[in-house]
């Protein structure tokens, strides 16, 4: 056992002391915020420098009031259409032709321009005409603003779930979705990245031929185990640093631009949805006192919702989620790590590893894809149940559903099967590994692997 | 006392038998040459001693005890396929490998410094293996093999990769280790090494031990009573029923070199006595077969009589 500790220590220190470890550990969390920062910067700069384009409007319906919007200043054009079309480009960005139209079915609006208008410009253009047509309709149906506001309905259904203990808890499906997704992705990434590192490490030992010296001092199985655990501890350390760094850096970058972190964003997601449907009419520029009242009411309701969201967030069983996450994080890593070690032992180079790497990563990939296709959307379906029970997919699938509440017996069964699963893969991998690491230049296929597996002592 | 005794050791793989009832006795405090052509089973045998793989059947005892895990620190192993961690520093590497053999960290530190000093390479301590030349890395590997003071040292082709100067240095170290009480097992194809260094040998061929004993015993077993003499004048006659002249040539003036073969049972002293009466003798020595000749002859599957003829011709 003491020797396994020595191996773990070497694997750990050797990796952590490398310059590349320092670089990736520090740079990776910087990359994401840096990209985000650059993009936000570009968007902000762009919106600052937006030029207002002049657009002529040939309004044959005589119904529109021309004014200035975010992208355009509308000016009337002289008809008829053909002459307006011929000369608009000398002094304007484009020309809008509005034919006489039926208010119930407005059509025939055309925008002529030399350059293609951007998507945002087109949206702005559409909105300008839509808003006015809408107002015309309101007038026609004799609906005033007050009635309209009164019609507006907000119902936020509070979700309450009953736990195993019968206790009722308020919950939020959005939050459950996001938590499940983040945890699932983390496990998938961790298993894949560090699994491949194990494989690489085994191949390195094999090609540098140091392995024969090592196995004259320790059992091949001890070497394999030490390597897997050593790399796991490197991975855990790196992950912790990443999480701390990316959280810190992201919030400071976003804070610089006066924006909120994705975490905060997420918490406000729910309240935002309620606000959806807000449009120009509630914009404060209109200065209507009724609207102001309405706005302050909204504000209050938003605050209330935020509080509730926060409460829901805090009422999630975090202790349980963290413990389950760590369990599947390590369980999944050990299960796949052993298989990656076996793949590494069977080949002489990383290139040769491709053919065996695929079947090893396939179940992991299935788990990852089904996380998005099934587990997150239907966490209580039969498919999700099986995905979170079968050890090869359970690490990703179970953390994907854990926040939505998993019956205790399912969790227990899944955990027991995962332990059994990694003991099983470690046993198989160990048998292949002990033979594989001493083989050089052998052409390996599945038959050979089976032979190694069966080989005695 | 025996350093190692192997009894009926057998190891089978799916398609072939690597060792077939191999018996070997390796006396303590000697240099033992384990010989055999490629694929004979030497590496398998060495791996079994190192407990890298297990034998299917048979017993191995080491210094009188059955081989077990506690003997890992008793053995030092230099495999034919050399290798160290490329990215690891020399000092760290030596300490790590010694610790795996059961040495404490403090002792490993002392010992590794002592050995680097001995080889006058103390400034390598912080160098990575990948920055060393092949010969330099070999030296480090040799140190790692013997640093934990093993009683049994197994060296597989220890001189490959060394220049003559370093090969001599390593030879001296090997002899010093033997003199300090270690037993050394050599596995090699270089017959001059065997002639120079080995006290005892065993020849494994096709998974079996076909020859075993001290170097002298083995040579005696294959001596053919052939003598090489130098003498003045070529006009002597020997009894053709008892002697056969195999070859004769002029060295210079009337100095001749002659190879004669005596009938079995005639002792060298007797030959000298007879020659002195008949010619002016200037040198006399018995031609013993070289290890290379014995090796090649036996491996090519010649029976003893054919081998003797072969050896005689090659002399």
Image (spheres, rainbow, N blue to C red):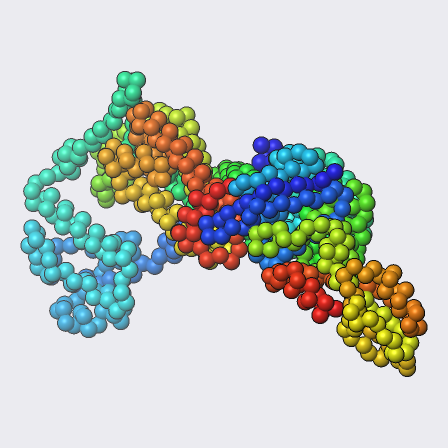
- In the rendering, at what x and y percent does residue B77 appear? 66, 46
Left or right: residue B60 compared with residue A441: right
Res. A369 image quadrant:
top left
- In the rendering, at what x and y percent does residue A196 appear? 47, 48
Residue closer to the observer: B253 or A41: B253
Residue closer to the observer: A41 or A191: A191
Res. B93 image quadrant:
top right
- In the rendering, at what x and y percent does residue B185 appear? 70, 48
- In the rendering, at what x and y percent does residue A337 appear? 46, 42
Res. A393 image quadrant:
top left
Residue closer to the observer: A316 or A432: A432
Looking at this view, name the residue that lies furthest to the top: A166
Residue B193 visible in this rendered orientation of the protein: no
Residue A147 visible in this rendered orientation of the protein: yes
Q: How many marks?
A: 0
Give above or below for A257 relative to B130: above
Left or right: residue B160 compared with residue A454: right
Residue at (8% x, 57% y) in the render: A101
Residue at (70% x, 37% y) in the render: B63
Residue at (68% x, 41% y) in the render: B4
Residue closer to the observer: A102 or B160: B160
Residue at (66% x, 41% y) in the render: B5
Quadrant location of the N terminus of chain B in the rendered image: top right
Give above or below for B141 relative to A168: below
Quadrant location of the C terminus of chain B in the rendered image: bottom right
Left or right: residue A263 compared with residue B144: left
């Amino acid at each position: 056992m003491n020797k396994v500790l020595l191996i773990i220590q070497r694997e750990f220190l050797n990796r952590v002391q490398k310059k590349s470890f320092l670089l990736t550990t520090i740079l990776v969390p910087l990359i994401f915020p840096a990209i985000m920062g650059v993009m936000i910067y570009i968007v902000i700069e762009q919106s600052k420098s937006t030029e207002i384009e002049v657009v002529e409007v040939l309004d044959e319906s005589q119904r529109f009031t021309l004014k200035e919007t975010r992208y355009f200043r509308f000016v009337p054009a002289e008809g008829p259409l053909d002459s307006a079309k011929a000369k608009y480009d000398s002094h304007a960005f484009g020309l809008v032709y509005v034919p006489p139209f039926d208010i119930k079915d407005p059509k025939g609006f055309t925008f002529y321009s030399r350059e293609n208008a951007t998507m945002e410009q087109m949206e702005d253009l559409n909105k300008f005409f839509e808003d006015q047509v809408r107002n015309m309709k309101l007038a026609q149906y004799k609906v005033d603003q007050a009635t309209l506001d009164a019609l507006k309905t907000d119902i936020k259904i509070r979700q309450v779930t009953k736990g195993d203990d019968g206790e009722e808890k308020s919950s939020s499906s959005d939050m459950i979705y996001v938590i499940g997704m983040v945890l699932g992705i983390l496990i998938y990434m961790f298993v894949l990245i560090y699994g491949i590192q194990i494989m690489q490490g085994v191949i390195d030992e094999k090609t540098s031929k140091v392995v024969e010296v090592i196995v004259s001092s320790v059992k091949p199985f001890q070497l394999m185990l030490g390597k897997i655990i050593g790399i796991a501890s490197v991975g855990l350390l790196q992950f912790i640093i990443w999480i701390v760094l990316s959280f810190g850096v992201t919030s400071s970058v976003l804070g610089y631009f006066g924006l909120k972190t994705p975490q905060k964003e997420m918490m406000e997601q729910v309240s935002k949805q309620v606000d959806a449907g807000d449009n120009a009419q509630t914009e404060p520029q209109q200065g209507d006192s009724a609207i102001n009242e309405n706005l302050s009411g909204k504000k209050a309701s938003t605050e209330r919702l935020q509080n509730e969201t926060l409460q829901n967030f805090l009422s999630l069983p975090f202790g349980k989620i963290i413990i389950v996450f760590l369990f599947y994080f390590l369980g999944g890593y050990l299960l796949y790590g052993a298989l990656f070690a076996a793949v590494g032992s069977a080949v002489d180079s990383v290139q040769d590893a491709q053919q065996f790497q695929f079947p090893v990563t396939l179940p992991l990939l299935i788990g990852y894809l089904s996380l998005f296709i099934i587990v997150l959307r239907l966490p209580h379906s039969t498919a999700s149940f099986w995905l979170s029970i079968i050890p090869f997919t359970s690490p990703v699938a179970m953390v994907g559903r854990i926040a939505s509440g998993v019956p205790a017996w399912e969790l227990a069964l899944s955990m027991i099967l995962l332990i059994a699963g990694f003991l099983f893969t470690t046993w198989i991998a160990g048998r292949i590994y002990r033979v594989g690491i001493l083989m050089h230049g052998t052409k390996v296929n599945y038959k050979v692997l089976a032979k190694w597996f069966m080989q005695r002592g | 006392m025996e350093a190692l005794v192997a009894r009926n050791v057998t190891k089978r793989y799916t398609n072939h038998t690597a060792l077939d009832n191999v018996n070997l006795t390796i006396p303590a405090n000697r240099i033992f040459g384990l010989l055999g052509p490629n694929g004979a089973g030497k590496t398998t045998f060495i791996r079994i001693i190192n407990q890298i793989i297990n034998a299917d059947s048979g017993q191995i005892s080491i210094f009188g005890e059955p081989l077990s895990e506690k003997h890992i620190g008793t053995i030092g192993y230099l495999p034919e396929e050399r290798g160290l961690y490329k990215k690891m520093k020399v000092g760290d590497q030596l300490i790590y490998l010694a610790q795996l053999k059961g040495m404490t960290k403090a002792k490993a530190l002392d010992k590794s410094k002592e050995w680097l000093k001995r080889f006058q390479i103390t400034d390598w301590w912080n160098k990575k293996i990948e920055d060393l030349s092949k010969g330099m890395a070999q030296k480090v590997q040799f140190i790692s093999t013997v640093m934990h003071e093993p009683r049994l040292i197994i060296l597989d082709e220890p001189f490959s990769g060394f220049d003559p100067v370093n090969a001599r240095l390593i030879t001296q170290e090997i002899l010093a280790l033997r003199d300090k009480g270690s037993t050394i097992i050599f596995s090699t194809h270089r017959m001059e090494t065997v002639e120079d260094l080995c006290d005892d040998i065993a020849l494994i061929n096709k998974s079996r031990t076909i020859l075993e004993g001290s170097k002298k015993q083995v040579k005696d077993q294959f001596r053919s009573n052939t003598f090489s003499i130098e003498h003045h004048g070529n006009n002597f006659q020997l009894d053709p029923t008892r002697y056969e002249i195999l070859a004769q040539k002029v060295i210079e003036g009337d100095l001749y070199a002659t190879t004669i073969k005596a009938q079995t049972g005639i002792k060298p002293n007797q030959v000298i006595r007879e020659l002195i009466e008949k010619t002016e003798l200037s040198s006399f020595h018995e031609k013993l077969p070289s290890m290379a000749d014995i090796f090649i002859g036996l491996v090519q599957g010649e029976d003893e009589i054919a081998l003797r003829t072969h050896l005689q011709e090659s002399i």
